[in-house]
Amino acid sequence: MAWIVSNARVLASIEVARTPRERAKGLIGRDGFEGAFVIDPCRWIHTIGMRFPIDVAYVNASGEVIKSSTVGRYRLPMPVFKAKFVIEATAGAFERWGLHVGDPIEIRS
């Protein structure tokens, strides 16, 4: 199992989308999600076909959160070109975890 870690704190277990098919599908078709979903590489997401709103954190190549937002269903936010990967979670998760812009992120197995 893999984990997302920030400042030596484990924030959540993660599922990582690595193949083009996994990245394209993301969380579409799910009724909810526990933990975090990482799409690597990724600079742009959408929530068309999603059944719930999500929190999205864009992380750069240095492992720093450069943008974070809550995205409602059926939305098409702007791409974040400096992002290397994104972290998605059920809306409200980042607040519970204390995840903010500027936080360092590590993915650990």
Image (tube, rainbow, N blue to C red):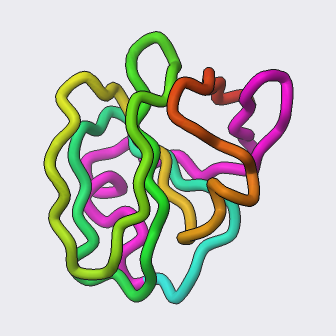
Q: Quadrant of the C terminus?
A: top right
Give the quarter of the image for residue 85.
top left
Near-viewer residue (22 or 65): 65
In the image, farthest residue toward the top: 62
In magenta stretch: residue 28: yes
- Taking the image as shown, residue 89 lies to the left or right of residue 13, namely left
In the image, farthest residue toward the right: 9
Near-viewer residue (105 or 16): 105
Near-viewer residue (26 or 68): 68
Give the quarter of the image for residue 82.
top left
Identify the residue at image location x=42%, y=70%. 27
Image spot of residue 88 (x, y percent): 48, 55
3 w.r.t. 27: above or below: above
Q: Quadrant of the N terminus?
A: top right
36 w.r.t. 19: above or below: below
Start-end of magenta stretch = 1-29
Near-viewer residue (104 or 100): 100
- Taking the image as shown, residue 18 lies to the left or right of residue 65, namely left
Image spot of residue 106 (x, y percent): 65, 24
Identify the residue at image location x=52%, y=19%. 63
Image spot of residue 18 (x, y percent): 40, 41
In magenta stretch: residue 100: no
Identify the residue at image location x=22%, y=80%. 74
Identify the residue at image location x=16%, y=65%. 76
Report the number of discs: 0
35 w.r.t. 83: above or below: below
- Taking the image as shown, residue 78 lies to the left or right of residue 22, namely left
Give the quarter of the image for residue 58.
top left
- Taking the image as shown, residue 60 lies to the left or right of residue 104, namely left
Image spot of residue 103 (x, y percent): 61, 26
